[in-house]
Amino acid sequence: MSSVATAAGVSLTTVSHVLNRTRRVSADTRARVLEAAEALGYYDQRVARAQESKLTIGVVLPAMSSPYFGELIDSIDAEAARCGATVLLSASNEDPAKEAAAVRALLDRDVDALILVPTSGWRDRTRPLLRDARVATVLADRLEDRGFDQVGSENTLATRRLIEHLIGAGHTRIGMITGLTGLSTSRERETGFRLAHEGAGLAVDPALIWDGLSTVRGGFAAAEEMLRGPHPPSAVFCGNNNMTMGLLGAIRRAGVRVPSDLAVVAFDDLEWADIVTPSVTSIAQPFHAMGNRAVQLVLQRLADPRREPRTVRLPASIEHRESCGCHAPVPAA
């Protein structure tokens, strides 16, 4: 898919949307992507189909109702179907005990492989289960252990580029609503936030960082606290899509104007991000490429159990829109 993106002159995210038919893409762009895919033999190079006895892949995600994880489920299921595999789904609700119980139940069903989006407490409960079971396992989205195959998007550099864009537009007091503590994605995005400030010679004010718990409610509460403060920021970066929904709700209730009163940028691009007013500048993860790659890593692990584990980082793209109040495009991550 990366080769197709390069040949067509588009982002990996755009290739995912065209090939998986998950979001509207202009006719010209769609034609370029399909031509590049055909020329490169994209479909011919897929991992070989599973044997007649269908493989079963267990998938454990934090939530199935989240727009983000919904897209990830779609891509995993579509790629598994193309490869002749069956998918069994379960949700952890970010609860390490429930995650471990779900993994144990799938192992009891003798699944051939597992794809796991780990919780913050997975090391104490779930990781030992997976080590003992020796089932082909891929960690998705949250890259927590190089002892397993894992695939996720690039978080740190994309965040750094987006915050540098705000700084270049004149913002020196930038707030951040962070995700759930203990997750690699939360750490990496905050690292990118701090690196952008460091590169510009600016200090990060601890009073401008709020914990949004990776939820809509948490994002709403963090935004309310931010807006009530004596010295609110002139711009804010939200660490995931759920918290962005909460942030926008709090902003609307408070009557804050975006971007004139507060510039807003976010990690995770949502389907409605370009149709709300103002449209939201955001970092788009290649959800479908991530799901496709997770299934391919599973099949490769089954074919060669002894090979060294692989960590795959997929590039994120920055969708420049109105909410940041800037006219210059953001440099590619």
Image: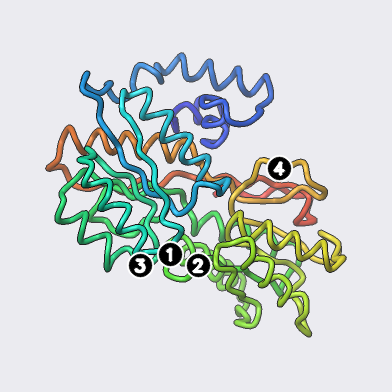
Q: Is residue 22 left or right of residue 246?
A: left
Give the percent coordinates (x, y) of residue 267.
59, 55
Relative to 80, is 62 on the left or the right? right
Q: Earlier in the sequence, mark 3 or mark 4?
A: 3
- Closest to the camera, between mark 3 and mark 4, is 3
Q: Residue at x 77, y 82 (%)?
A: 231
Residue position marked by numbered label 1 in the rendering: 183
What amino acid type should be assigned to the residue bearing mark 1? Leu
Circle 1: is it few (<14), some (14-19), or many (20+) Cα within 10 Å?
Answer: some
Mark 3 and mark 4 in contact? Answer it, CB < 8 Å.
Answer: no
Q: Which of labels 1 and 3 is toward the front?
A: 3
Task: Provide the residue designation for mark 3.
Answer: 121
The residue depicted at 19 percent of the width and 35 percent of the height is: 302
Q: Secondary structure at mark 3?
A: loop
Q: CA distance from mark 4 to mark 1?
A: 26 Å
Gap in Å between the C-alphas at discs 1 and 3?
9 Å
Q: Residues within 10 Å of mark 4 (few under 14, many from 20)?
A: few
Q: Residue furthest bottom?
A: 230
Judging by the rendered image, the residue that carries numbered circle 4 is 272
